[in-house]
Amino acid sequence: MSLLEIRNLHVSVDGHEILKGINLAVNAGEVHSIMGPNGSGKSTLAQVLSRRDMYRVTSGEIRFNGKDLLAMKPEEAAAEGVFMAFQYPVEIPGISNTYFLRSALNAIRKYRGEEEIDAMDFLPVFREKLKLLEMDERLMNRSVNEGFSGGEKKRNEILQMAILDPKLAILDETDSGLDIDALRIVAQGVNAMRSPDRAMLVVTHYQRLLNYIVPDFVHVLVDGRIMRSGGPQLALELEAKGYASMEAEARQTVPASA
Amino acid sequence: MSTNVDTIRNLAEREYKWGFVTEVEDDRVPKGLNEEIIRTISAKKEEPQFMLEWRLKAYRHWASLEKSEAEPKWANIKYGPIDYQGIVYYSAPKKKAGLQSLDEVDPEILRTYEKLGIPLAEQKMLAGVAVDAVFDSVSVATTFKAKLAELGVIFCSFSEAVQQHPELVQKYLGSVVPYTDNFFAALNAAVFTDGSFVYVPKGVRCPMELSTYFRINAAETGQFERTLIVADEGAYVSYLEGCTAPIRDENQLHAAVVELVAFDNAQIKYSTVQNWYPGDKQGRGGIYNFVTKRGKCAGMNSKISWTQVETGSAITWKYPSCILQGDNAVGEFYSVALTNNYQQADTGTKMIHLGKNTTSTIVSKGISAGHGQNTYRGMVKIMKGASHARNYTQCDSLLIGDQCGAHTFPYIEVKNSSSRMEHEASTSKIGEDQLFYLQQRGLKTEDAVSMIVNGFCKQVFRELPMEFAVEAQKLLSVSLEGSVG
Ligand SMILES: Nc1ncnc2c1ncn2[C@@H]1O[C@H](COP(=O)(O)OP(=O)(O)OP(=O)(O)O)[C@@H](O)[C@H]1O
Ligand SMILES: [Mg+2]
């Protein structure tokens, strides 16, 4: 059984159907990339997987690690091992990054029946991950994402992921807003986290990121449906041809009821 | 340090000292307010003549206000008429309704005690259930008393001060908040039964935070409490008032007065955590808290800071203020006011700049949840002589849900062209995106809300003494329970 199994997922927001029957299986150890034009539903999929409640699942099923993911609250999904790096990270004024991270880690540990970790024991783990992402410790005494540059925010997401150690990591356009060096560093951080126990869903618009984080599978999402799936070469093909031709192709080959 | 322990200690000590237990039955005056009652109160307290006269003048002033229906109505709060003749103005010690066991206490309050981690014996004490335990704290208190006495610091109940230091009381009583100040201040002056008195002599830095913890026989000061703190030249004192556990109280009306006086180079830091009974979820019951707090920076380079965390009471009407008289004087007001369910708060400050180069800082954080209504009302007045005066005001409101309200009324009066004013204000809602972000990282809704709220209040919390800040944070979380989701 796969770590993540999505079957015939239909999702609406405000009465508009956005996801129109997604089927996807992701095994532990695999990296899947999701590509697709603006507005095709990539973030929607990511948010449904992390259980944001403004999205209404009208039909379909998601199993995560054998459990019914759709029955979980966001914090339960998080504690079960779902992590999403946000496309637009949020600011929390007045709460330091360090405090926030430790609170999050402890909330998850508590859910799992593990002992909470105190500030002393947390520090070495924290420093090691900071180093991995080449982040300045001083940034961590500032409020969560407040006044962070776009790139710093994205890097901060990956830092959180490294500390929370999820089973499924969903990266929603983590590459956008990163300069070339930051992109390399973030990719290194992500690659360091690849492991046989962990799966990753990498949402991106650009082949560039996939040069660093080489996926096992690439899926192309168009208008709420997965139009094509393939290996890493599919991303290259997309880069060359663009979505338009693929959409046209899809219209010819995929029956409307798919 | 636990302020709850203090309350118990003080009660225990008070009974010990004054042997109230045997006196309870008959030490009460009849309901209502008239000159006879005032005379009786003063006589029972064996007060000197000047006190009686002052009380009588206050009473007459209050009576004239009452007659002309001058109870203030300008605040943004709604409440039914208060029956001033239906109140018992003296009853010592205020023997609570005499509950026999915790079973008779509102289970909501008990749940809160548990969340705050208050031991059983203390829970009983706070809830007004008879406690039979003996608290051996006299020695602790006397140690502190001895240390303070060595430095010449006077810290005692107001009643004791009237007996032991009448000259100081006569000199400063009403010097900052005269009985003519307002309706509730007049009422308090007429009938107040007790409170705290602090005098810190020249050049003395009070070595410990003063709170009821160190004070013998001063808890249970009742609904008309009066506090007077004087810091002589170069003195420093930090005073803590309050309790983080909700106190069940039979009295609906509370009208306290606090006066602070700081001379040259003196500094007074006054911190409050107020968590009186807020009423139930439907808005029934709860304390009406009408408080007049004012400090006078009488001397050069003097400084007075008010820090308050107001989470209790059905109605809060409170404007801790500073009169910046001495040149270079500094006034500060840091406030968190939370209203949940049907609570109403109209709170803020007044900064009156008289001296040159005086500066004031106002940071107000209002949090509204449920049907709560939260109003910031502030006045900054810069008088002609206050050249180069400066004020910074920051006034932020946070809304949780869409049935609550936040309102701000900043009044500014500037009569000096060399002064500088800065004003910032914001209103925000706890965003679904913020909540989701924290939940996605594993935090439960309640913890996510309290994290956002605590972050919002950070500027104020960091002004509180450490232990107080920790308790205040816990308190906010408990007070907000069930406000989201
Ligand atoms: N909360 C919402 N309310 C209304 N419409 C929404 C909401 N969330 C998403 N949508 C709509 O759903 C569609 C898919 O949005 P989504 O954010 O999933 O796209 P995306 O593939 O991530 O696009 P991008 O590449 O631009 O990030 C869009 O048309 C968007 O406007
Ligand atoms: Mg998107």
Image: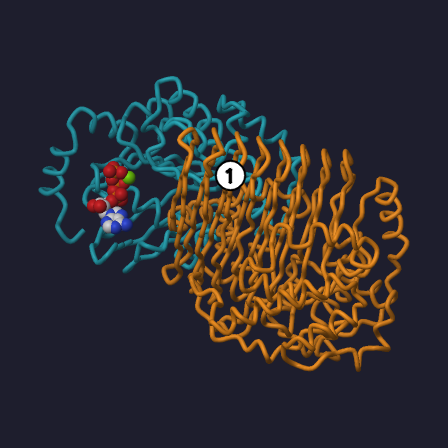
Chain colours: A cyan, B orange
Across and down, in percent, residue B471 comes to 64, 51
Across and down, in percent, residue B331 comes to 56, 39
**Residue A24 vs residue A82, the one in the foreground:** A82
Residue B1 in view here = no
**Residue B484 vs residue B327, the one in the foreground:** B327
**Residue type marked 1:** His
Q: Residue at (17%, 24%) from the top-left corner?
A: A240
- The correct choice, above or below, for B32 with respect to B301 in the image is below
Task: Check disc 1 and report the residue beneath it.
Answer: B353
Residue B150: image quadrant is top right
- Splitting the image into four quadrants, where does ligand 1 fall? top left
The answer to whether the beta carbon of the residue marked 1 is less than 8 Å from any atom of ligand 1 is: no
- The correct choice, above or below, for B284 with respect to A16 in the image is below
Across and down, in percent, residue B20 comes to 83, 72
Residue B86 in view here = yes
**Residue B358 vs residue B473, the one in the foreground:** B358
Q: Is residue B415 left or right of residue B275?
A: left
- The correct choice, above or below, for B430 with respect to B383 in the image is below
Q: Chain of mark 1?
A: B
What is the crowding at mark 1: few (fewer than 14 residues within 10 Å), some, or many (at least 20)?
many
Outermost residue toward the top in this view: A181
**Residue B424 vs residue A21, the one in the foreground:** B424
Q: Is residue A85 left or right of residue B98?
A: left
Across and down, in percent, residue B407 comes to 39, 54
Q: Is residue A75 left or right of residue A245?
A: right
Q: Quadrant of the C terminus of chain B?
A: bottom left
